[in-house]
Image: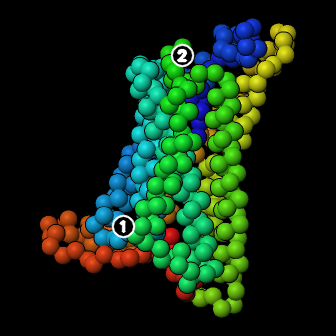
Amino acid sequence: MATSEDFAVTTITSIDTTTDFYYESDECDKTSLIESGAIFIPAFFSIVVILSLFGNILVIVILVKYENLKSITNTFILNLAVSDLFFTAGLPFWAYDHMHGWIFGLYPCKIVSFVFYLGFYSSGFLLILMTAHRYIAVMNPLSDIVSTKGFYSVLASVVIWGLSVLVTSPAFIFTKVDQNHCVFENSNWNLWAIYQQNALFILNSVVFIFCYSQIICRLLRPTAQRRKSKTLKLIFALVAVFFVGWAPYNIVIFLKSFSFWPQPPADSADVVRSCEMTKRLDYAFYISRLFAFSHCCLNPVFYVFLGVKFKNHLKKMLKSWGHNNNSSIPNRQSRLTIISVTSGEELSM
C-alpha cells in the first residue's frame, strides 16, 4: 500500500527549518514525470477498478447463491472479496487526486484513506490466515480447524476486521488536506504507514514461504497423485504473483522513507543529485504501484475461480441466466476447494 503522501506528486527538495525535513519546492522539475503519469496511471487504475468490481462482486454473488457461508473456508473468501472491494473503492479518488488534486474536502479525505487502508490490511491478514488454513488442510486434513464452521467462522471475521480497524484508525485520525492533496499530517505518520506496510509484507512473505514450501514437499512425495503438477503450477503462480506485485513496491516505499528522516544541509550539487535520484525513485514507485494495486483484481482468479467447484457454479449461473431459468438451484456445499486435500489434486482454501 502506498501512504497518502505517496499519492501526491512531489517536487523535492528544500529544507523546512522548523522541522528539518525535506519538503516540496520548485528546484526539482518533475514536469515530464507528472505528464507521463497523468494519462497512463488513471487509465490503468480504471481497468483495475472495473476488473476488481466485476470479479469480487461475482465471487460474493456465487457464494451467497450456492455455498454454505457458515464454513470458515467460504467465510475467508467472502471477507477477502469485501476487503478487495474496500481497497478498490479508494483507487478512483487517488487517480483523480494524482491528476487534479484533492477537491473533496477534509472528511472525505479521512474516510477514503480509512476505507483504502482497511481494505489493504484486512486483505493482508486474510491472505495469511487462508495460507495457514491451506497448510493445515494439506498437512493434517483431519484437523478440526479444516472443517470449522458456525460460531468460529463469525469469530474469525470479527477478529480480522477488528484488528484491521485498529491498525487502520490512524489513517482516519492523522490525515489532512495540504497543498491540494490528501496526505498524512506529518512525516512521522508517513514513516509509520510505510514501515507498517513493510512489516505486513514481511509477515506475509514468511507465511507464504514456510507454508507453501511445506505443501510442495508433501506433494512431491511418491504417494502423491499423478496430477500433482497442476497443483504445483498453481502454487508457484500464487507465490510469483504475490512477490512480483508486492516486493518491488515495498522496496521502493522503504527507500522513499529516507526522505522523511532529518537531513543535513545540502549544497547545490547535492540538491541536483538528490533531485535525479528522487526522479528515478518516483518512476520506480509509479511502476511498482501499478503491479501491487492490481492484486485486488487478481485475488478472485487465484483464490476462487481456479477451483473446479466454483467454476461449475459459475457455469450453472450463466446457463440459468441465458435460459431465464432460476428455478433450479444446486444444493449448497459445505466447502469450497481449489486442490483436493486427499488426492493432492486440490488444495483446500
Can you say whether 235 is above or below 45 in the image?
below
Location of mark 2 (residue): 178
| Residue 47 image offset from top left, x and y in percent | 43, 43
- Give me the residue at 30% from left, 64% from top: 64
- Give me the residue at 50% from left, 70% from top: 349
SS label for mark 2: strand
What is the quadrant of residue 62 in the picture?
A: bottom left
Badge nearest the viewer, 1 or 2: 1
Task: Residue type at mark 1: give it.
Answer: Leu
Location of mark 1 (residue): 69
Q: How many marks?
A: 2
- Give me the residue at 66% from left, 10% from top: 25
Image disc number at residue 61:
none
Nearest to the observer: residue 159 or residue 7? 159
Side of 129 where 329 appears, left or right: left
Task: Residue type at mark 2: give it.
Answer: Asp
